[in-house]
Amino acid sequence: MCFRITLLIISFLSFSIFINVKGQNVVVLGGNIIVEDDTYFVIQGNLTFKSEITEAECDLNGDILLDGDITNLTSSNVFTNIEISPDGWVTMRNPTLEQHILGATPIHFENLSTLGSAKVLENNNSMVNGLFRLNSVFNLNKRNFIINNSESSSINYIGGYLFAETNSVIGIGSLQWNIGDNTGNYSIPFGSGQTHNCDIAVDYQVDDVGNSAGFVVFSTYPTEVDNLPYPEFVLRTDPFPANVIADRFWIVDAESYLQKPRSSLRLRYTNSDLRAGNIINNRILNPIYYNFSTHTWLKHTLFANNFAHNLMEVTSVDFSSANKNWTIVSHDITGEIFIPNAFTPDTDGLNEVFMPLIGFETETYKLYIYDRWGKILFTSYDPKIGWNGMSGNFCYPIGVYVWKIFLTLPGGKEFSRTGHVSLIK
């Protein structure tokens, strides 16, 4: 059953009035609804705007309390006459049933409040011009949601979280904040769904402002243990092997700025982002970003790892290098180096060559084999070439030999180790 408003201008006078449409849907078929100050328009069904002869619009100065979905089937943005300080509120308040923001044309809310059940965004680039009060799960659902208010307080977080856990293959959910040349600490309350709160929130602190027309797009999503799928246009995780990288990417995209802002980031991660199967020491983590010029990941050197609270603090980020894709890598990858203590070059085809086993690509590599008097017997500059216990046609006798290995780890850290290997026949 529908309550239809057709080609009318309806004005509710500005004293406290409750208009309660129980058990019905409201369809606005053209015309303009004016909801005055101190008026509460309670809709216990769905609210749909359709165009019939004229566009269906709403001049909202009071409150719409909505228990169902809101759908825009017009070519307008629904809410008109939005003030410099927007005063109208849409409250999506159903306590148990999922509510949806629908339609092909974006809805430009004055203020939007969510509480109770999960809300699902199915209308790309819908926008809040005033305050976005979040007290529920808000599923971005592979769409972009816009905060068109440069103040850092324009997301009023009470509870719940923004859910953006889809990936680059099926589509990334994102929040666009039109920050412009404003300053402050902008907190984006992303949640993983593993808890009831924003456990993977991103904080963006503007240190040096950009130009007034700029905006920043934020997102984050988990990956498989091999870090797939990569963010858009990212080709690989080189020079870092996948199993030393957290199973999550963060996107902080400031490409809209002509004058790029200098900023600081706080990235929160979950324990499952450092899951078993990775060689990651959570006490020794480093933020890295993707460089589109070299198609490699680079370490950001100014950071603080608050491992007790699963928080990576990244300072002095210069977005002029288009470093929008971020993740976290472990310094400690020496567990990926296995060096045997014996080999048997006896031509039986088993364990014929002494060779350190390294599970990642090295930047530089040197292996030296010495006899007991310190004479170099063998040198290799290729981790795939080991010592077969010979020099030309001469076979070295059974005994204990000294080896030294020098290499550069992914990201530039140097590593060396010395030990002994037994030649057995």
Image (tube, helix red, strand yellow):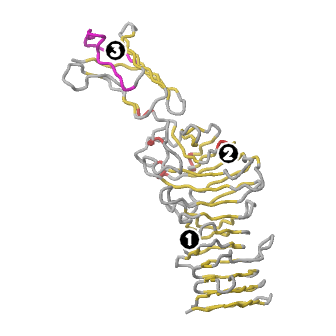
Q: What label does residue 51 carry, if any?
A: none
Q: Mark 2 points at which residue?
A: 319
Labelled pair 2, 3 in contact (Cβ < 8 Å): no
Foreground disc of the pair 2, 3:
2
Q: In this view, does 372 lie to the left or right of 142?
A: left
As helix, strand or loop, the secondary structure at mark 3 comes to strand
282 is higher (above) or lower (below) than 39? above
Q: Does the magenta stretch include residue 355?
A: no
User: Residue under circle 3?
Assistant: 401
Mark 3: amino acid: Tyr
Q: Where is residue 106 in the image (x, y as percent from the top left)?
A: 64, 71
Amino acid type, label 1:
Glu
Q: Mark 1 points at which residue?
A: 122
Using the numbered discs, state the Cα–Cα distance from disc 2 to disc 1 in whole angstroms: 30 Å
> How far apart in space, not on screen, are marks 3 and 1 (Cα)?
67 Å
> 10 Å neighbourhood of mark 1: few (<14), some, or many (≥20)?
many
3D distance between C-alphas at marks 2 and 3: 51 Å
Where is the N terminus found, in terms of image quarters?
bottom right
397 inside magenta stretch: yes
Q: Is residue 287 visible?
A: no
Q: Is residue 37 left or right of residue 157?
A: right
Give the residue type that dot 2 points to.
Answer: Phe
Magenta residues span: 383-403
Q: Classify mark 2: helix, strand or loop.
A: helix
User: Which residue is pictured at 49% across the width and 41% down the height?
Assistant: 237
